[in-house]
Image (spheres, helix red, strand yellow):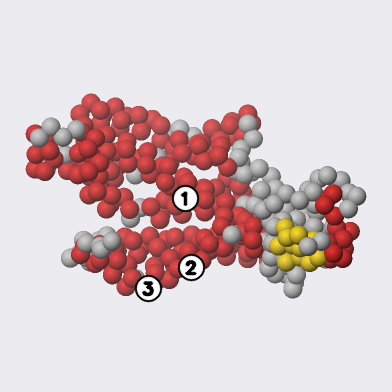
Amino acid sequence: MRLSPLWQRRLAVFRAHRRGRLSLSIFACVFVVSMAANFIANDKPLLMAYRGQLYIPAVQFIPETTFGDYLPTEADFTNPTIKAAINAHGWMLWPPIPYSYDTIVWNAGPMAPAPPSARNWLGTDEVSRDVLARVIYGLRISILFGFGLTIAASLIGIIAGAVQGFYGGLTDLLFQRFIEIWSGMPQLFLLIILASIIAPSFWVLLLFLLLFSWMTLTGVVRAEFLRARNLDYVRAAKALGVPDWRIMARHMLPNAMIATLTFLPFILSDSVTVLASLDFLGFGMPPGAPSLGELVSEAKNNLQAPWLACTAFATLGGILILLIFIGEAVRDAFDPRKTQ
């Protein structure tokens, strides 16, 4: 599909922004690596052959009874006995990092946390788990959470702002008063109360934060619709009897999206920060789940292990810097002064 001249100019401006283009490339690589975490860091082989039959333990349930007179539970491929039984009648292909986010590294050092080594490139944490594996899985959770919260909050915020700006009057007044009241709710205190009732999880946190995050884009979309509702093409569409939803979706929303698209990378970075902050305070993901915020908390509790602090700072700070640089490039690409 051929792009319009305007979009071609926007794409050219984005490409000319070297810092933003490089940040997008790095972020895309990080995204691909985090999505493939099960095939990069896992305590199960990627591929295995046993007695002439192929298995894919990374995505397949294999009981211990497959290898002899053992229990019918899932095979523990780190068990020396299981490994010896497999190697005697086959072979195993391991991922680059033979540890998952919850794998205990028993021989990493005399005490945990252990410093970086040839086996554990970023060392181990206070529970003797591989830090690099937890970083990769933690990035996946943070990115998926950020994308989910950003997309859902943006959709609700755009719809709310469009209704406010299109109808105006009493509808706009009531919406504005509701947003003022709702935005004044103490989110942290409500989250503490929620955590005392139910155990926080990925979806619980996503739904809870969505209750307050949708207001980010409402004001921007409302302003664009208030400006466009009295333009000639909107009046002409109303005079022709075009339904309100079609006018908003087909004629007014594309113009409003130009302003909202520039906010999306910044909203995504804010979503990642919120999850890390909640994990650091202990109100985020369940204990043991791979989390960048939990890594920051472990670094605070283990000042004698500087590799934890350096890893937490580099990972969390790096992902936020990449998103900010991408946001700057997107903002320049949609700047009318640079695309004329």
Tell me if residue 1 comes above or below residue 182 in the rendering: below
Residue most extreme to the front: 52
Q: Amino acid at mark 2?
A: Ile
Check disc 1: other Cα within 10 Å, few if <14, some if 14-19, many if 20+.
some
Residue, disc 2: 26
Q: Nearer the viewer, residue 23 or 197?
A: 23
Q: Residue 171 lies in what quarter of the image?
A: top left
Residue, disc 3: 18
Q: Comparing marks 3 and 1, which lies closer to the viewer?
A: 1
Check disc 3: other Cα within 10 Å, few if <14, some if 14-19, many if 20+.
few
Q: Is residue 332 visible?
A: yes
Q: Earlier in the sequence, mark 3 or mark 1?
A: 3
Question: What residue is shown at x 29% (from left), y 66% (from top)?
Answer: 11
Tell me if residue 55 comes above or below residue 163 in the rendering: below
Describe the element under mark 2 as helix, strand or loop.
Answer: helix
Q: Comparing marks 2 and 3, which lies closer to the viewer?
A: 2
Question: What residue is shown at x 27% (from left), y 53% (from top)?
Answer: 258
Give the distance between the C-alpha atoms of the residues marked 1 and 2, in whole angstroms. Answer: 17 Å
Describe the element under mark 1 as helix, strand or loop.
Answer: helix
Describe the element under mark 3 as helix, strand or loop.
Answer: helix
Residue 80 marker = none
Mark 2 and 3 residues: CB-CB less than 8 Å, in contact?
no
Question: What residue is shown at x 12% (from left), y 32% (from top)?
Answer: 241
Q: Is residue 264 left or right of residue 38?
A: left
Check disc 2: other Cα within 10 Å, few if <14, some if 14-19, many if 20+.
some
Q: Nearer the viewer, residue 295 or 69?
A: 69
Residue 147 marker = 1
Q: Is residue 60 left or right of residue 86?
A: left
